[in-house]
Image (cartoon, rainbow, N blue to C red):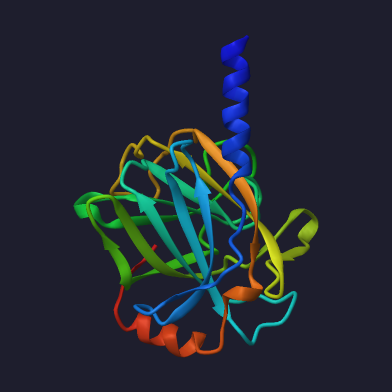
Amino acid sequence: MLWNLLFAVIATLLRSVSAAESVAVHDAETGLTYSPNFALYKVDGRGITFRIAIPSNVSSNSAYDAVVQVIIPNDVGWAGLAWGGSMTKNPLMVFWRGPNNQPVLSSRWASSHTLPQPYAIATYNLFKTGTKSNSTHWQFTALCTGCTSWAVDGGAVRYIQPNGSNRLAFAYSPTKPSNPSSPTSAITVHDVHAYWNHDFSTARNAGFKAAVQRLLGSQGFRA
């Protein structure tokens, strides 16, 4: 009984600590300003940093490109970002460290609580600039097209609103995919997941288009 209670408390803590940070972060390397969130997956303080940058000239209920920058501890097997704040019926960005320490980004979609399948509507361009690693963490920066809007049941379209908060979610597993060199590899069930309200209003960049064009000039590959 005591162990069950302790496990429940730890699980609740991990789910509740992902609260979006209110202070925007400017990254001089990519030239973009990001709205950040630190998502804890271990009670010892380990977590994944998610940063998002968007254009300043987009209006509500419209689709737009977004740049996502993620900083990941080396012990992560795979992790994922749910753009709609849940595992099902929204674009998923699943990622892990592949051969030669290169990031692998996998665009996925899950219609139910089963293994997410490849999702061709959302695509990722991984930038060489802003993608790096060291002895403790690795980082990637990528442009996503098709992540801020998607069709839901009944044919309606859901949008990530650029002027306020949107619910996002993440998942973490310590186990690497079965075929880490392939973006379509099978993945294990996650150990931890959490949700937060991400402030997109602080992610807006007046120079978004020029920065992305410069970054695309040194891009690595499309996932």
Residue at image position (59%, 31%) is 11
Up-down relation of residue 204 to residue 2 (above or below): below
**Can you give x and y, in whole percent of width and height, for residue 215 in the image?**
36, 81
Placement of the C terminus among the 4 image quadrants: bottom left
Q: Is residue 50 visible?
A: yes
Left or right: 198 in relation to 173: right
Depth check, front residue: 33 or 58: 33
Placement of the N terminus among the 4 image quadrants: top right
Marks counted in the figure total 0
**Can you give x and y, in whole percent of width and height, for residue 113 in the image?**
61, 36
Residue at image position (66%, 50%) is 89
Residue 4 sits in quarter: top right
Left or right: 175 in relation to 181: right
Left or right: 101 in relation to 28: left
Q: Is residue 118 visible?
A: no
Residue 194 sits in quarter: top right
Depth check, front residue: 27 or 187: 27
Up-down relation of residue 78 to residue 60 (above or below): above
Residue at image position (34%, 38%) is 176
Up-down relation of residue 74 to residue 151 (above or below): above
